[in-house]
Image: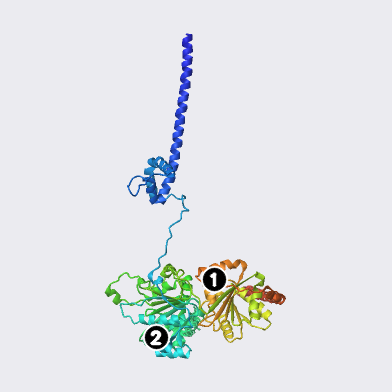
Amino acid sequence: MDLFVINRYRDVEEDASVDIAEQEAKHLEKLKKKIAERKSAYASKRTSDVITLKPQKQKELVEPKKDAKDNKEAPKTDEETKTDSNIDVIQKPDKKRAKPSQEFKVLGVNDFEKKAKVSRVLPFWLSHPFNISTSLKSSSCTVKDQDWLHSTLKSTLQSEGVTTLFPVQEKVIPFILDQHKLTYPFWPHDICVSAPTGSGKTLSFVLPIVQSLMNEIGCHIRALVVLPVQELAAQVAKVFKKYCLKTRLKVALLGGSTPLQQEQQSLVRYTESSGWVSEADIVVCTAGRLVEHLQNTEGFSLKHLKFLVIDEADRIMDHIQNDWLYHVDKHIKLENELMTGRHSNLTWSSLIEQKPPPHKLLFSATLSQDPEKLEQWGLFQPKLFSAAKSNNYEDEDQIRLYATPEELTEQYVTCDAEHKPLILYHFLADQKWDKVLCFTNAAEAAHRLSVLLNTWSNGIFKVAELSSALDKSTRENVLKKFTQSEINVLIGTDALARGIDITDCNYVISYDPPRNIKTYIHRVGRTGRAGRSGHAVTILLQNQVTQFKEIIQGGGKAEIPQIEIEAGILDRLTSSYQNAMSETKRQIHAEIDTKVKKSLEIKRRLKSKPQKRKLNTS
Ligand SMILES: Nc1ncnc2c1ncn2[C@@H]1O[C@H](COP(=O)(O)OP(=O)(O)OP(=O)(O)O)[C@@H](O)[C@H]1O
């Protein structure tokens, strides 16, 4: 029994201990297996990512290297052996899983890998423009020797003192005239012209339009010139009128400065025999006013339009006003594809039947050469005339940037905020800069600066404001006085930086830095026009220098030199500046008081009016 008991006890004890040990061993094995599986799964995931991103390396990793000579396996380095053994472990179970990861990239892994450089390819017409020289002085294209120019225009040019044509005129005018010699079904190529400020772009569309239309008879609008603002429309209309003087062509200005009704009367006439006829052959307008006429003027028709000129095209493009191009498109009643340059039905007979769309001519000193932006104009087989050099001379497909006149000297000066007026005064009073156009970033700042300078100068030089806050006649008066040297300095905002042709402006000072390259190009472009020399200086605070340099570099321009001004010069001006400043403050406060009083008076009157009415009705 003892034996039995002992045996039974021992048996039980021994069996139990064997079970536990076995179980523990099994459990440990299971755990080890799990760990191994997890490790392999993790490693295979990483390997598959590498394979996804570098397909050639996958081959290298999976296939053993072979000796080029005998096609045998090449001896492996220690590192390779390690990697291979890892891959054996990792890849065998995961080979199937690795496949789909070749199709779907795992996000978040190896995202920082260097991506292949994508090079931009421009359409041929943008990468291969007709080059225009920026040097106006070296032009040898004399007006009298140009056989293609009508004698009437030659005589007007000579009476205007134009004896040679500028490079842009020499290239663009004969091209436009040749395009209009084409007979149906050949249509003229639309053109984009990007030439420096003051290089004579206006005459390069005025002359061919006048010459093409002067011998045609018809009471229709045949040329439409669209500009972004009233002042520019008036300026261009003036040039057209000059060159149409000896012809029978009539020019109408739709600028919005006169009431719509008055413009309508000068634009269309109703006759019993012919119905509505146009009084003008050439219409110069702002985009906004054009839409008003298209919608409200009976008899206003663009069906016979031959030329559609868009001057300062990039500005109009940036602020597409009232979808004017869509309205023009609709009005001409051609198929929309025609205006947008696409042809749904390109058969010989359809081409012969169709009238060509108006010849589109786009002009600007800062015309975008970005194909996506130009796409919206729907140009027909366009050609580019550009004075700008490619950003990268080796790569012709680089977008070309903007050019400034060769006769223009550009500089910048740095100072502290409190020294800005002192530097400006130093240029005007000490260095005696005359015929200066000074730009600020706000109309209010322009006003304060003009009050300060007038007080400070005490009659040595005369300063006037030229901002959009002034009415049209005051602005014209100010410009006239500037031309006649009755005013020496004009202080304005960017509203007037574009396109305005101010005769004899010698200096442009950016009192506040320009916000972008286009603003800079148009500001400095008010001087150095038509081959005359000009000087542009930008006043910068220390913390604005980097941004300014980036703007200039971004526009593809060479670095601009800095002017140094001795601190002693500015110190000498400090006391007179302080006196002028206190007087300016007094004047500005007085102006504000008057304005407040006036507005209070208006409010009081408005309040009292309804009361009177109430009294009357009661
Ligand atoms: N061939 C020429 N000879 C002499 N002067 C010219 C000639 N062509 C144009 N001009 C004069 O050059 C000045 C600038 O011309 P225009 O206004 O056409 O320049 P622009 O290229 O349109 O400049 P912006 O881009 O600033 O509008 C005008 O005063 C104009 O009369």
Answer yes or no: do the residues labelled 1 and 2 have beta carbons within 8 Å?
Answer: no
Residue lying farthest to the left in this orientation? 349
CA separation, marks 1 and 2?
Answer: 42 Å
- Single out the residue that lies furthest toward the top: 1
Residue plotted at (45% across, 50% down): 107
Note whether 138 is above or below 73 in the view shown: below
Residue 452, by quadrant, is bottom right
Q: How is the image coloured?
A: rainbow
Asked if residue 98 shows in the view, the reply is yes
Element on which disc 1 rests:
loop
Residue shown at the point (31%, 76%) measured from the top left: 354
Quarter of the image for residue 87 reads top left
Answer left or right for 568 relative to 139: right
Q: Residues within 10 Å of mark 1 (few under 14, many from 20)?
A: few
Find residue 96 and name its label: none
Residue at point 36% right, 81% down? 178
- Report the side of 242 relative to 542 (left or right): left
The C terminus is located in which quarter? bottom right
The residue that mark 2 highlights is 211
Q: Amino acid at mark 2?
A: Gln
Residue 94 rendering spot, x and y as whole percentages: 39, 42
- The answer to whether residue 305 shows anywhere in this view is no
Q: Is residue 475 left or right of residue 167?
A: right
Callout in the foreground (1, 2): 1
Residue 110: image location, x then y, percent? 46, 51
User: How far across and how far down the image is residue 163, in percent?
Assistant: 46, 88
Query: Which amino acid lies under the numbered mark 1 shown in the image of this protein?
Result: Glu
Q: Quadrant of residue 490?
A: bottom right
Q: Residue at x 38, y 49 (%)?
A: 102
Residue 307, given in percent of the width and then of the height, sits at 40, 79
The CB of the residue at mark 2 lies under 8 Å from ligand 1: no
* Disc marking residue 559: 1
